[in-house]
């Protein structure tokens, strides 16, 4: 004979089974609803944070909207015309170094959309000119000082970590020449060569000289005269 518990007897009757079914169904529907809601939120909120909405203004491509958002003004900044300040991603002093990624009224090409809305600092002039001359990461990274540049021909070389320098806007404006060409990154033959025997301490000398802000040094010894001479001066430059 089958055991007869009051609870199971209740469940086997039709009405409670219907209730359990409806309760389970409502739970499932609620779960589904919340899942969809959280999915929607995680899709939308980051875009809203970046100032991008699901339906941007007509005629503005999503890419342009992202660009525009990335140069939103920093309302916390003492100067509202300055863009948001974010820490540089590289270098040991990155927490101390901040760079300006944009400014109000600056279009993606870097020109002011409202003339006279902000004063054009030498830094921005540099960024614009460097960007137009194809300088890598010119808009999003702090410009490297002359000492930090490595000739493009030496692609295998390590790029030195940018260091603190005393470069001011005045310095930058002096370095931007009158004919509006940026002086960074041009290829030149060296003005000094370190020659030494193996294990003679040449690396230590190079690193010591590199510490000077006016010295621009390669990252890896080029070994031009002993290994790469046949590649010619264009390679060496
Ligand atoms: N100031 C000073 N005094 C004494 N010794 C020094 C100094 N500076 C560098 N060194 C030592 O020099 C060695 C590296 O020399 P190089 O940079 O010429 O090496 S390399 O040939 O280019 O690989 C390397 O030696 P090892 O550590 O035995 O390799 C350095 O420790």
Image (cartoon, rainbow, N blue to C red):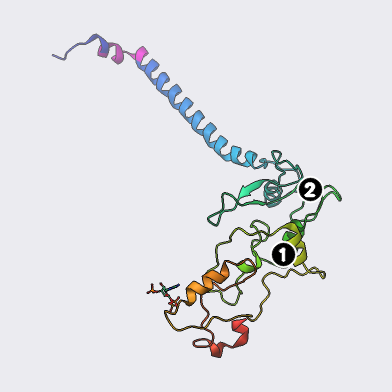
User: Is residue 28 depicted above or below 173 in this figure?
Assistant: above
Q: Give the range drawn in magenta.
A: 8-16
In the displayed orientation, state which residue is furthest to the bottom.
230
The part of the image, by quadrant, that contains residue 76 is top right
Residue 162 appears in the rendering? yes
Q: Which residue is drawn at 64% across and 61% down?
A: 137
Tell me: 161 left or right of 117.
Answer: left
Q: x, y percentage for residue 190?
A: 62, 80
Tell me: 149 left or right of 103.
Answer: left
Tell me: 173 left or right of 63.
Answer: right
Residue 109 appears in the rendering? no
Q: Nearer the viewer, residue 27 or 106?
A: 106
* Ligand 1 sits in quadrant: bottom left
Q: In which quarter of the image is the C terminus?
A: bottom right
- The kind of secondary structure element at disc 2 is loop
Q: How crowded is mark 2: few (under 14 residues within 10 Å), some or many (20 or more)?
A: many
User: Is residue 178 depicted above or below 123 in this figure?
Assistant: below
Q: Which of marks 2 and 1 is nearer the N terminus?
A: 2
**Residue hosting label 1:** 130
**Magenta: predominant secondary structure element?**
helix
Q: x, y percentage for residue 1?
A: 13, 13
- The kind of secondary structure element at disc 1 is helix
Q: Nearer the viewer, residue 129 or 26?
A: 129
Q: Residue at x 73, y 41 (%)?
A: 78
Q: x, y percentage for residue 198?
A: 43, 82
User: Is residue 64 depicted above or below 79 in this figure?
Assistant: below
Spatial CA span between label 2 and label 1: 19 Å
**Residue hosting label 2:** 105
């Amino acid at each position: 004979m089958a055991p007869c518990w009051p609870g199971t007897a209740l469940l086997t009757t039709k009405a409670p089974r219907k209730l359990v079914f409806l309760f389970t169904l409502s739970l499932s529907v609620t779960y589904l609803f919340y899942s969809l809601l959280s999915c929607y939120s995680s899709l939308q909120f980051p875009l809203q944070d970046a100032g991008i909405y699901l339906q941007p203004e007509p005629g503005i491509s999503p890419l342009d909207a992202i660009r525009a958002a990335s140069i939103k003004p920093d309302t916390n900044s003492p100067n509202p015309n300055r863009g948001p300040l974010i820490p540089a991603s590289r270098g040991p002093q990155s927490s101390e170094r901040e760079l300006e990624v944009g400014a109000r009224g600056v279009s993606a090409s870097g020109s002011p959309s409202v003339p006279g809305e902000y004063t054009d600092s030498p830094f921005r002039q540099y960024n614009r000119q460097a960007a137009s001359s194809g300088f890598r990461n010119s808009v999003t990274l702090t410009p490297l000082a002359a000492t930090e540049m490595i000739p493009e021909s030496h692609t295998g070389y390590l790029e030195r970590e940018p260091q603190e320098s005393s470069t001011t806007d005045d310095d930058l404006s002096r370095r931007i020449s009158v004919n509006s060409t940026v002086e960074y990154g041009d290829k030149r033959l060296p003005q000094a060569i370190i020659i030494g025997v193996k294990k003679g301490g040449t690396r230590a000398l190079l690193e010591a000289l590199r510490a000077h802000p006016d010295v621009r040094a390669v990252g890896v010894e080029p070994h031009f005269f002993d290994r790469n001479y046949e590649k010619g001066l264009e390679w060496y430059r």
